[in-house]
Amino acid sequence: MGEIILVRHGQANSGATDEESYDRLSDLGHQQARWLGDYLRDREGPFDKVISGSLRRHKETAAGIGYDGPQIDARLNEMDYFNLGQALEDVHGVPFPGPDQFAAHVPQVMEAWHKAEIMGVETFASFEDRVTSVLQEAAKPGSRVLCVTSGGVIGMIIRHLLNLDPTRMAHVLLPIMNSSLHRVRVIPQGPILASFNAVPHLDQDDRMYAQTHY
C-alpha cells in the first residue's frame, strides 16, 4: 500500500490584498511548520519523495518541516484566488470579502469559475488537470510521498477522489487549517481519502491558538 500525505502551508500573510504580498509565512506560520516537522520525525517513517509547490510559502513550510531541498513542482501551486475574486466582482458585482466573509464567497467563485463565467490565469479545467496529474504520478503502490501545497490544491484532489461538485468542493476548502495533514492511501483499486484536516502537532492546550485557517 502506498501513501500520499498532503500538507497545507503554514499561516501566510493573511492581511494581504494580492498574491505577491500574501506569499510569505508569518512568524506563526514558521512555528507551525517547525512543530509539524517535530511531529513527523517522531511519528512517521521516512518518505520516498518530498514534493513542494514553487511558491515561497510552500518552500518556507517545507524548510520548517526539515526539508530544505524538496522536489519543486509548480503543479502544486495554488489557484490565483485574488484574480478570481476580482473577476467575480467585475462580472457579477460581488465584492472581495473580508476575512470573515469567505464562507459565502468561495462557493460563488468556484461555481462561476467552473462555469467559465470568470477566469484568472487559468481555467477551472486546467487547474483540475494539473492537480490531478500530480496525484496520479504520486500514487504509486509501496511509495510514501509528502506534498507541501495549498488549500485549493488539497480541495481539488478531494473533489477528484470523492467526485464533488464545485459547491461541495468549496465547503471542503473552507475549514482546511494551516499546516494540516491530509492522507491519501494507494490501494490496488486506486487512491482513496484516508483522513482530512488533521493537526496533531497543534492538539495541545498551549497550541490551540495556532489552529488557524488564514
Image (spheres, rainbow, N blue to C red):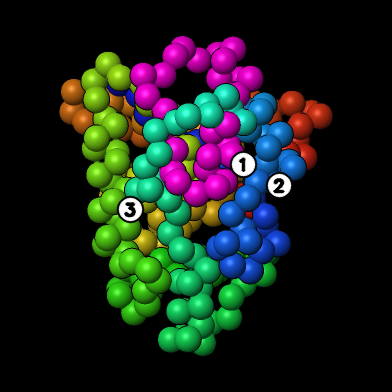
* Residue type, mark 3 in image: Leu
Q: Position of residue 15 (x, y in %)?
A: 70, 62
Region in magenta: 37-63
- On whether residue 28 falls in the magenta region, the answer is no
- Is residue 116 toward the left or the right of residue 104 in the image? left
> What residue appears at the point 73 percent right and 41 percent down from the top-left corner?
28
Residues marked 1 and 2 touching at CB (< 8 Å): yes
Q: Is residue 162 above or below residue 114?
A: above
The residue singled out by tag 3 in the image is 164
The residue singled out by tag 1 in the image is 10
Q: Position of residue 106 (x, y in %)?
A: 50, 65
* Residue type, mark 1 in image: Gly
Q: Position of residue 108 (x, y in %)?
A: 46, 72
- Considering the numbered disc 1 on the image, is that residue within a helix, a strand or a loop? loop
Q: Earlier in the sequence, mark 1 or mark 2?
A: 1
Gap between marks 1 and 2, in whole Å? 8 Å
Q: Is residue 197 above or below residue 13?
A: above
Q: Earlier in the sequence, mark 3 or mark 2?
A: 2
The residue singled out by tag 2 in the image is 26
